[in-house]
Amino acid sequence: MTEHQGQNRWLTMLNRVWRVFTTAIAFSLFGLGGLVLGIFVFPLIFLFIKSPGTRQNVARRIISNAFKLFLFIVRGVGAISYEITGIENADTASNQIIIANHPTLIDVIFLVSVFPQADCVIKESITRNLFMRSVVFSTNYIASGTTSVFLRTCVSRLKSGASLLLFPEGTRTVPGQALDFKLGAASLAVKAGSTILPVTIQSSHPRYLAKNQAWYRIPPEKPLISLHIYPSQPVESFAHIDHDRRKSTRELNQALLNFFNDKLS
């Protein structure tokens, strides 16, 4: 090994150690920030802003800006790179279902930073968390809960003009496995008759922050996470919708899966 090669090897190693360190710091700050918001900021919002609509808008804007700050920090310290294209298609006031694939742990952070007022789905257990209850009630996000109640709530929100953020896979993609869309997102789109806004997410290192991968498993090179926002389209542009909802749901789900597979290939 030449002296130059040896220096490059050491620089690569130091860079990797640095990114492990900065990633740990970034996620620690993220957790600490969540506690500060949950314990101090959101209880005050819930206490002093009496209008539910105003409280929801303010709370969601705070969450979105906190996520933007997190992304600014992780990119600034060199932990990751990211790019968001098609931002002109991100009409944050539209009534639509925002559908995205889910390759990394931080996908929702990207999406909420772009779509601050979208309804998000959270685990029901979070509503019982002492530190997070004020965040949940202030933002008015949708708890998963019982399937029938959850679906009715989502359809009601969509029909009232809201946007809903969904990952049809239901969980993060397992690296090396094909996308597997559950029927939930397609079923909601058929029932509510909402437009669909697709967002594709790709990572230059597919195993980075992926399912069953520890956060400290840092790739040799800085990962690049790319998001592309496509124009929103009516449900009918993906599949034929008729009175047979089950058939329409299956056709729409397959059409969405084909769309994402094509765009991600």
Image (cartoon, rainbow, N blue to C red):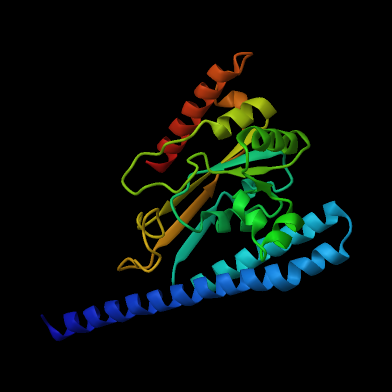
Direction top: furthest residue: 243
- Residue 221 is situated, as x and y percent measured from the top left of the image, at 33, 68
Q: Quadrant of the C terminus?
A: top left
**Residue 96 visible in rendering:** yes
Name the residue rendered at 47%, 35% in the picture.
181
Name the residue rendered at 35%, 56% in the picture.
207
Residue 97 is left or right of residue 157, and the answer is: left
- Residue 50 is situated, as x and y percent measured from the top left of the image, at 89, 59
Q: As displayed, is residue 154 above or below residue 174?
A: above
Direction bottom: furthest residue: 3
Q: As displayed, is residue 189 above or below residue 38?
A: above
Foreground residue among 232 and 98? 98
Name the residue rendered at 67%, 64% in the picture.
130
Residue 86 is left or right of residue 115, and the answer is: left
**Residue 77 visible in rendering:** no
Q: Residue 3 lies in what quarter of the image?
A: bottom left
Name the residue rendered at 57%, 58% in the picture.
109
- Residue 38 is situated, as x and y percent measured from the top left of the image, at 69, 67
Number of dots carrying numbers:
0
Foreground residue among 89 and 246? 246
Q: As displayed, is residue 187 above or below residue 166?
A: above
Residue 175 is left or right of residue 57, and the answer is: left
Q: Quadrant of the N terminus?
A: bottom left
- Residue 58 is situated, as x and y percent measured from the top left of the image, at 78, 60
Foreground residue among 126 and 177? 126
